[in-house]
Structure formats: C-alpha cells, structure tokens
C-alpha cells in the first residue's frame, strides 16, 4: 500500500498545463491510487509563501516559467545540472518533519530525448537555438550532451540574453549570440543547421514560419530547397505550430513540443516516486488529451 502524497505544477497562468494528464496517468499505472497531482496558480510573488508551506505530505513540484528561476533562492539544495543551467523545473520534497527541498532540472533530459527521436543515429555538428530564456539555457546543456558545444543562439533582444550567456559560461560551452535580424541571415542559419530548437513562446515564431514557407521552391537564397536538419519546437499550442508545419513542408524532420513535455515528465515521475516511469501509459494519456 502506498502512502498518500501530493504533487503539483505551479505557474501563472496554469490552467492550460498538460502536466496533470501525464502525472496522473503515471500514478494510475504505478498503482499510486492515493497520490494527487494538481495545477496551482502561483505567481512569482506568491511562490516563497507556497514553498515555505510544503510539508512531508508533498512529493514534489513541477514549475513553469518564470518560477524556474525564482525558486532558486528558496531551496535547501540545487543539483549540479540545475545549478549550472540556472533553472529548476522540479522540486523534490525529501525527509520528514521539516523537509529538505531539492531543485532539479529535467528539461535537459526532455530536450535530449526529444531530439534523439528525430536524429536517430545522426550526429549534431551544428545547431541553432531560438530564444534566450531558461529553456534556451537547458537546450545549451542538452546540445552539449549531444556533442555540439558551439551553437548559434538567435535572440529577439540581446539585452535579455544575459542569463543565458552566464549559464553558457558556467557550462563551459561557447555559443555565438546573434539577433534575429536580419531575417535572411537567420533563414540561412536554419537551412545549414543539423538541429534547430525553438524555445520561443507560443506563436512568437509564426513570422519566421511565414518566411520559411515563402522561400519554398525559390531556387536561390536562404529559403531555397529542402531543409536537412531536425527541428524541435518546444511550444505545442496550436498543434501543430506554424513553425513545425512550415519545417515539415520544407522537407525537414520536425519533433513536436509535446515530446519534450513527455520526456521531462517521465524523469520527474521517476524522481518523485522513486520508480521507473510508465512511459507508454503517459504517452497514451497525452495523445488522448491532445486529440
């Protein structure tokens, strides 16, 4: 018989989250019938009080942005990978009495596993990352695990890239930071890359998707011909995203954002429950929810 435990995904807004679908399916498959997993709307300002109220009944938390960085100063211990990335998406509540709070990062695992689905046995020699938030920092760590330590990071504003630059320095990787303008330079980079990871918010990449499609069949320039690389668009709303659809239309291999979501959640389940995640059950539940 399992001991009743609580877990939750925190964010603001949070109603759209698919994490409850994944974790509840895992609990059911593992026979953890008295475990609960709920979405809780928590702002940055509310997070310290929420974390201070955690007790031994809690197994852990999943965190969305911007809480992944806000939580860093509220924990007893941060695992090395999460510390070097500068982002915690998983909090583990360990021990009885006054519990010990441990911060972990499963986003790196999620990006690696999702990209491997599209790459197969192919090596990653060149990569482009779109965006410069916490997920971009996790992506740099993931690309390093896949053998690419010198990706290009294209950002909307260089002034907002400082956190990712510092994370790259801590990791010992050497990305090149560029702005997304001029568009022709960005499109040329996408065409050359073995891997492209978009960490932009939902619909933020739609203008780029339009440029990709406009170049189809042009015969010259950055938009010409088929794309040979693998795209991971971390956004998954709408499904498919405009960028994913445009990439596939240009002949590239596209891995959808829900694959990253699935894989990072399987690692969270393993860490919170101490058991191997029931991947098939979680995958089926996700597919049903998205259908």
Image: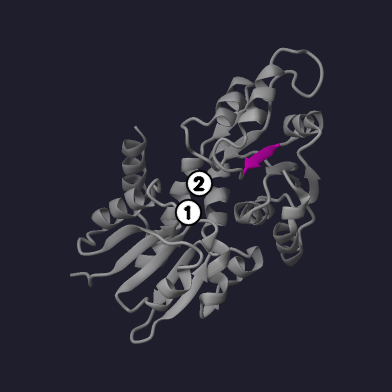
Left or right? Give the position of 171 relative to 234.
right
> Magenta stretch?
194-198
Q: Is residue 66 above or below residue 78?
A: above
Indicate the position of residue 95 as horizontal and vertical percent values.
37, 82
Q: Residue, x 76% and y 63% (percent of image)?
A: 169
Q: Can residue 120 be seen in this view?
A: no
As measured in the structure, the alpha-carbon distance from the residue carrying label 1 to the one carrying label 2 is: 6 Å
Query: Which secondary structure lies at badge 1?
Result: helix
Mark 2 element type: helix
Q: Name the residue under label 1.
A: 264
Q: Is residue 240 above or below residue 76?
A: above
**Residue 67 image offset from top left, x and y in percent:** 52, 62
The reply to whether residue 145 is in sight is yes
Q: Residues within 10 Å of mark 1 (few under 14, many from 20)?
A: many
- Nearest to the observer: residue 157 or residue 227: 157
Residue neighbourhood size for the residue with mark 2, other residues' Cα within 10 Å, grouped as few (<14), some (14–19), many (≥20): many
Q: Residue 99, which numbered label?
A: none
In the image, 67 versus 253, the foreground residue is 67
Residue under the point 63% across and 42% down: 197
In the foreground, 43 or 129? 43
**Label disc, if present, on residue 260 of the rendered structure:** 2
* CB within 8 Å, label 1 to label 2: yes
Q: Is the magenta stretch mostly helix, strand or loop?
A: strand
Residue beneath the point at 31% across and 37% down: 288
Residue occupying the point 79% across, 36% down: 181
Residue 184 falls in image quadrant: top right
Above or below, 200 relative to 63? above
Q: In the rendered view, how is the structure colored? A: one colour
């Amino acid at each position: 018989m399992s001991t009743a435990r609580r877990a939750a995904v925190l964010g603001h807004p949070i109603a759209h989250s698919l994490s409850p679908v994944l974790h509840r399916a895992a609990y059911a498959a593992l026979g953890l019938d008295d475990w609960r997993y709920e979405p809780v709307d928590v702002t940055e300002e509310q997070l310290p009080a929420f974390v201070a109220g955690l007790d031994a009944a809690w197994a852990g938390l999943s965190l969305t942005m911007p809480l992944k960085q806000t939580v860093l100063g509220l924990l007893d211990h941060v695992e090395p990978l999460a510390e070097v990335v500068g982002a915690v998406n998983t909090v583990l509540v360990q021990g009885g009495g006054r519990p010990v709070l441990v911060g972990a990062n499963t986003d790196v695992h999620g990006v690696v596993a999702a990209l491997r689905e599209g790459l197969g046995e192919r090596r990653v020699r060149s990569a482009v990352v779109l965006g410069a938030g916490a997920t971009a920092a996790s992506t740099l760590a993931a690309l390093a695990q896949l053998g690419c330590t010198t990706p290009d990071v294209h950002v909307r504003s260089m002034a907002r890239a400082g956190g990712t630059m510092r994370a790259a320095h801590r990791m010992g990787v050497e990305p090149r930071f560029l702005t997304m303008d001029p568009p022709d330079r960005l499109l040329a980079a996408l065409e050359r890359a073995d891997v492209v990871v978009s960490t932009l918010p939902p619909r933020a990449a739609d203008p780029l998707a339009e440029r990709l499609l406009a170049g189809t069949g042009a015969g010259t320039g950055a938009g010409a011909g088929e794309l040979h690389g693998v795209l991971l668009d971390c956004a998954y709303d709408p499904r498919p995203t405009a960028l994913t659809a445009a990439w596939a239309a240009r002949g590239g291999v596209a891995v959808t954002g829900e694959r990253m979501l699935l894989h990072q959640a399987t690692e969270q389940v393993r860490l919170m429950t101490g058991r191997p995640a029931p991947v098939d059950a979680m995958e089926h539940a996700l597919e049903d929810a998205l259908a």
